Amino acid sequence: MELRDKLKVGVVGASGSVGQRFVQLLANHPWFELTCVTGSERRVGKKYGETTRWILAEPMPAGVRNMVVIPSDPADVDADLVFSALPSDVARELEPRFAAAGIGVCTNAGAFRREPDVPILVPEVNADHTALVPVQRRNRGWSGFIVTNPNCTATGMTIALKALLDSFGLEQVFAVSLQALSGAGYPGVPSMDIIDNVVPYIKGEEEKVEWEPRKMLGTLRNEEIEPAGFTLSAHTNRVNVSDGHMVCLTVRLARRASVDEIKSALRDFRMPQICRDLPSAPDRAIEVREEDDRPQPRLDRSTGNGMSTVVGRVRPDNLWDVRLVVLSHNTIRGAAGGSLFNAELLVKQGYVG
């Protein structure tokens, strides 16, 4: 698919860690042109390069450095679509204003994930759930929309679970996460809390990881999503890793399968045809590693430009059927990159532009 003209997009809440990742990924995007960045009152009127403490390893794109930060108000935003990196409490107030003004919102915030007419979108998993957009518009009187990312931990594990669900069905899932520091935003976790330590609690995280995959893997029927019928229990932990969320999964399948069959199902998993030529789509949704000690965050988080889910240590389980380890890049696939992928799908489906 080629667009005659690039679509104008903005980043709302552009100075934080996820906002910066949006800005970085939008540089030279083939479909989207970044036309505006918004920020808090203390940043408004200043140049983005002067008011933003850039924390990514990649350099700040030259095209945004002299862009003047504007208020997070749809009246000031000249864009067909915005990417939201707002905190959830702020997003709850501001994102509907953009949707009501006819601007699509692809958001990393969790404020609307529980709304029945708002999809939690992962194109590899539930591209058909975008059919909720016209339902949402009708229900709320909007000409724009809100489409959310999942929680960053839920993203990679749901892609892996989708492959298993399609091939064997799921009955029970137990998940233990090892979550990177960048998932806490910037400045994040105090060094005295995390050096030489693991923090076995992340506020609100276990609840999200337990229900979001069931919504994403659910069935859209009669303009509603029926959550998938398996049960899921989770422990979430913060570890001293910069980027890359790892989840150790133990799974009880509806149909018993050998380890070789399970590995084949993971390797052979393909995203829907409509997603495969999108600019942010990885060559492979799931990469399976055979080494005993992979995946590892430092070695594997950038697989597929940070958009692939890496699975390893697939082996039998003494209690249920199978154990495996899932790794995904939390600020790319699990945040800004995921939102770009969502937006590309929405453009191709005709909901933007």
Image (tube, rainbow, N blue to C red):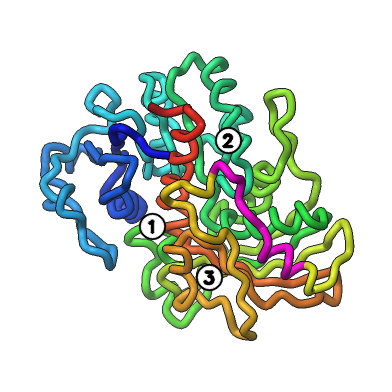
| Amino acid type at image mark 1 | Gly
Query: Which of the numbered marks, if any, corresponds to residue 199?
Result: 3
- The percent coordinates of residue 73 (x first, y second) are 28, 27
Query: Which of the numbered marks, if any, corresponds to residue 185?
Result: 1
- The percent coordinates of residue 219 (x first, y second) are 73, 37
Whichever of labels 2 and 3 marks the residue nearer the N terminus, that label is 2
| Amino acid type at image mark 3 | Val
Q: Dot 1: what SS?
A: loop
Q: CA distance from mark 2 to mark 1?
A: 24 Å
Question: In the image, which is nearer the foreground, mark 1 or mark 3?
Answer: 1
Asked whether residue 264 is drawn in magenta, I would say yes
Give the residue at x 51% y 55%. Answer: 152
- The percent coordinates of residue 91 (x first, y second) are 41, 36
Q: Quadrant of the C terminus?
A: top left
Q: Dot 3: what SS?
A: loop
Of residue 53 and residue 266, the one placed in the foreground of this image is 266
